[in-house]
Amino acid sequence: MANTVNQIIKEPIISVGIILPKDKKTEIVIDLPNPSNYKIDSGSLSKRLTVKCQWDAILINNKLVNKFTIEPIDNSNNNEFPPHTAGFPLRSNNYPIIQSVTTGRGFHWQKEIQVQLPGKIIIKNYNRYLFIINELPVEQYLPFVATSEMSPDCPPTLLEAQTIAARSWLLTNRKVNHPELNIDVCNDDCCQRYQGVMDVPDQSLQVIRKTYGQILRYRNEICNARYSKCCGGITESFENVWEGKPIPYLSSIPDFPHYSNQTNDLHNFINSSPPAFCSEKYVKSSDIQKYLGKVDKSDSYYRWNISYSQKELTSIINQKLDLEATSIINISPLKRGYSGRITELKIFYTDKSNKNKSIVLNSEYKIRNVLHKQFLYSSAIIIEQKTQRNSLPEKFKFIGAGWGHGVGLCQIGALGMALNGYSAGNILQHYFKNTKIEKIY
Ligand SMILES: [Zn+2]
Ligand SMILES: [Zn+2]
């Protein structure tokens, strides 16, 4: 998994899953604004292709094939495909458009969008479902990742830091999440969000030119540069969120300009609003919407709270865990990470036959999934349970900090740093200790 820096000497080509077999699509439409720029394995191209699964094969405009590739015509001597002018991405209205691509798989923001794709498009039949892959050079993929994750109105230093982190993440996480499909990454949040080239602004393309081939290096390796939306004031350590050994540059840090001893008492820390880079002091909540793009409705991710009645929480937990609890007796954190994120939580409940039972959730991901109808922003929560004497809690209140797993770069904190004059190098060295930026191709 870990890539040593010397292994990569030229810009890699990556494969991105756009429509996955699990999307269960059997029919799709692809528009080609300029078919004469493209070649295909067989048959002739038209402006609109209707693609269907037919048994184990694919039917393209009523012609049956096993596999179908739409490839830009190479106008250089390069073996790779254009547009590939020195690796820089181009924005073009001529790229093929795939209608109804699923994004936000499994989340409440799941929807179908159109995507316009540079590079090569490969269409396969995978167990009778469509499987569509986009193959393209890394530097053409990256600007579209950076802007899907953040708004182009962000300060350029933030986009630079985000792009270098995304490039490093990509080169260390190829083939990790989808081994059965043999693709490098998918198009969604499970890997990195990639929604094609529509509406990509000039700023993103400039950032790519400026940081072309630059990665974050730790010793002889490219960093597994994780990031999340908002750490909540302290970042989390890798080993508290994912399986595996601690990674030195992904260990917890206070997200403050100077070491802060406010971080010693987690309960107070979450209950108050200390002046971290991701706090109101550095980024106004009213600005978050503007810089983060239309990712979610709320504008308060640093500190937030949510309350449930006994009945509401019982019903959510029953649905999420497939239980038949009649009431929740108590919710008790067993373990917390450095950022206050709960990594192990015990839920005590009463079942149908009035027996007391309990269940343990052993990851921040499961906890976030179970304690919210959709998904809790983060598991860094203080739980207040309002109980009358000897009776069940009537109300549960979660006072929370941050959004996401909190490991590595804090996107809102990085925004706070960028808005306050810090450089991309400053930002990356703050979140990923003892690393340096290096150009590898
Ligand atoms: Zn994925
Ligand atoms: Zn932060």
Image: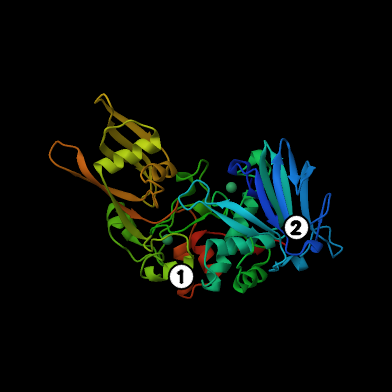
Looking at the rendered image, the quarter that the N terminus falls into is top right
Query: Tag 1: residue type?
Result: Lys
Q: Position of residue 38 (x, y in %)?
A: 80, 59
The answer to whether 198 appears left or right of 371 in the picture is: right
Residue drawn at (39%, 47%) of the image: 337
State the image coordinates of residue 153 (x, y, percent, origin top left).
52, 73
Q: Residue furthest right?
A: 77
Q: Which dot marks residue 9? A: 2
Q: Secondary structure at mark 1?
A: helix
Where is the C terminus found, in terms of image quarters?
A: bottom right
Compare residues 397 and 323 and report the one nearer the observer. 323
Q: Check disc 2 and report its element: helix, strand or loop.
A: loop
**Vertically, is 119 above or below 354?**
below
Q: Is residue 84 left or right of residue 166?
A: right
Q: Amino acid at mark 2?
A: Ile
Instruction: Answer whether residue 360 is visible to the viewer in this image.
Output: yes
Q: CA distance from mark 2 to mark 1?
A: 38 Å
Where is residue 412, by image quadrant?
Answer: bottom left
